[in-house]
């Protein structure tokens, strides 16, 4: 388990130099560099030395992130840091992340969380605590979570991963239920508030008519699909507003202004058979994208010891409270469990 022994000092206000087109990486790093429980783990030589999987190539990224964390939190006033060695090992792992290529912050975040996870994963015994009687579905959900993570668990799982359940039902009531772990909730932009987009994401949708029921004797069309969160205990929840729509010839950015709350109650999107204690989250950070689909710039807003800061590559400035809400550049929202 991750302990909360590390207390965040009033440092942690460093800028990160842009190494080409690395603003999307810098934004992701700045957000993660302010997640107390993640830092509590990655700042410790003892924990990293004990759990790093030296035989895996992901360990290079763990080592360099560990160095960045230690350096970042050691400066007691503003400094500019060049994250070149971390970016270099990331690029060596995946050619897509060449410093001079533009990339999507959400794709990079997914890759980076997975890489850190793989670099420190180890086997554990997994049991979920639920107050309800264990119905078949809950047993299936626990079993799927166990199959996925028992042999490869890491501290990243309890910080960032939740379990989604997808239910497909045909007109004859045949159900197909699948469970998948995820670290980012990606939602379409429907309506002008985050809550409306979430409501839409979790409503039943009709599948295309060429989708046929799995049941061999049935094979009905007109199936519906619904998603619900089966298990949500993660400390941080990333929500992506799907601003980029990919068409055959071009990518278009949806620039709608979406408003988002300070406090987000996720209870109605979580399976009601699971206990409801920990589903209230508070806004903790934002990754923003300014520009269009071809050319744009990423920056981050992060809550730090009760003040909000704007991290824009090497620049760090304080924000007033009215600047945090209602920004039409918002692309990824980070909520922290209350
Ligand atoms: Zn059927």
Image (spheres, helix red, strand yellow):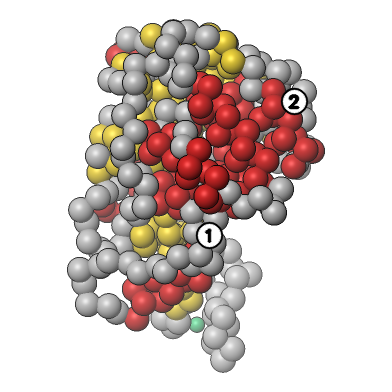
295 above or below 226?
Answer: above
Q: Element under label 2? A: loop
Callout 2 crowding tier (Cα within 10 Å): few <14, some 14–19, many ≥20: many
Whether residues under marks 2 and 1 lie with C-beta atoms below 8 angstroms apart, the answer is no
> In the image, is 7 to the left or to the right of 65?
left
Q: Quadrant of residue 193?
A: top left
Q: CA distance from mark 2 to mark 1?
A: 31 Å
In the image, 45 versus 164, the foreground residue is: 45
Name of the residue lying farthest toward the bottom = 217
Q: Quadrant of residue 198?
A: top left
Q: Name the residue rendered at 59%, 76% in the picture.
A: 212
Q: Give the label on residue 99, or none.
A: 2
Residue 26 horizontal/vertical position (percent): 58, 24
- Image x and y of residue 328, in percent: 46, 21
Residue drawn 55% across the image and 45% down it = 49
- Secondary-structure class at tag 1: loop
Q: Residues within 10 Å of mark 1 (few under 14, many from 20)?
A: some
Q: Say left or right for 146 vs 129.
A: right
| Residue position for label 1 | 122
Please indicate, yes or no, whether residue 291 appears anywhere in the rendered image: no
x and y, in percent, of residue 320 in the image: 32, 9
Residue 165 visible in the current orientation = yes
């Amino acid at each position: 388990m991750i302990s909360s022994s590390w207390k965040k000092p009033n440092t942690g206000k460093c800028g990160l130099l842009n190494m080409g087109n690395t603003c999307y990486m810098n934004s992701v790093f700045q957000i993660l560099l302010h997640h107390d429980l993640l830092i509590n783990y990655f700042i410790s030589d003892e924990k990293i030395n004990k759990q790093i999987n030296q035989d895996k190539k992901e360990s290079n990224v763990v080592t360099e992130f560990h160095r960045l964390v230690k350096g970042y939190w050691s400066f007691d006033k503003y400094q500019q840091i060049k994250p070149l060695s971390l970016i270099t090992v990331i690029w060596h792992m995946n050619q897509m992340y060449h410093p001079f290529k533009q990339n999507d912050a959400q794709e990079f975040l997914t890759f980076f969380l997975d890489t850190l996870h793989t670099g420190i994963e180890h086997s554990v015994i997994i049991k979920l605590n639920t107050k309800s009687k264990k119905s078949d579905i809950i047993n299936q959900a626990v079993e799927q979570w166990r199959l996925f993570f028992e042999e490869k668990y890491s501290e990243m799982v309890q910080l960032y991963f939740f379990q989604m359940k997808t239910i497909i039902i045909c007109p004859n009531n045949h159900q197909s239920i699948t469970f998948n772990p995820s670290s980012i909730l990606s939602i379409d932009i429907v309506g002008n508030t985050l809550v409306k987009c979430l409501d839409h994401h979790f409503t039943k949708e009709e599948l295309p008519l060429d989708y046929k029921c799995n049941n061999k004797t049935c094979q009905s069309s007109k199936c519906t699909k619904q998603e619900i969160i089966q298990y949500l205990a993660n400390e941080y929840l990333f929500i992506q507003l799907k601003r980029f729509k990919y068409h055959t010839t071009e990518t278009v950015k949806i620039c709608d202004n979406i408003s988002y709350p300070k406090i987000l109650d996720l209870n109605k999107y979580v399976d009601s058979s699971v206990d409801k204690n920990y589903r209230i989250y508070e806004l903790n950070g934002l990754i923003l994208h300014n520009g269009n689909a071809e050319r744009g710039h990423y920056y981050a807003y992060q809550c730090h010891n009760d003040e909000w800061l704007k991290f824009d590559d090497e620049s760090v400035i304080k924000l007033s409270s009215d600047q945090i809400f209602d920004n039409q550049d918002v692309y990824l929202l980070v909520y922290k469990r209350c």
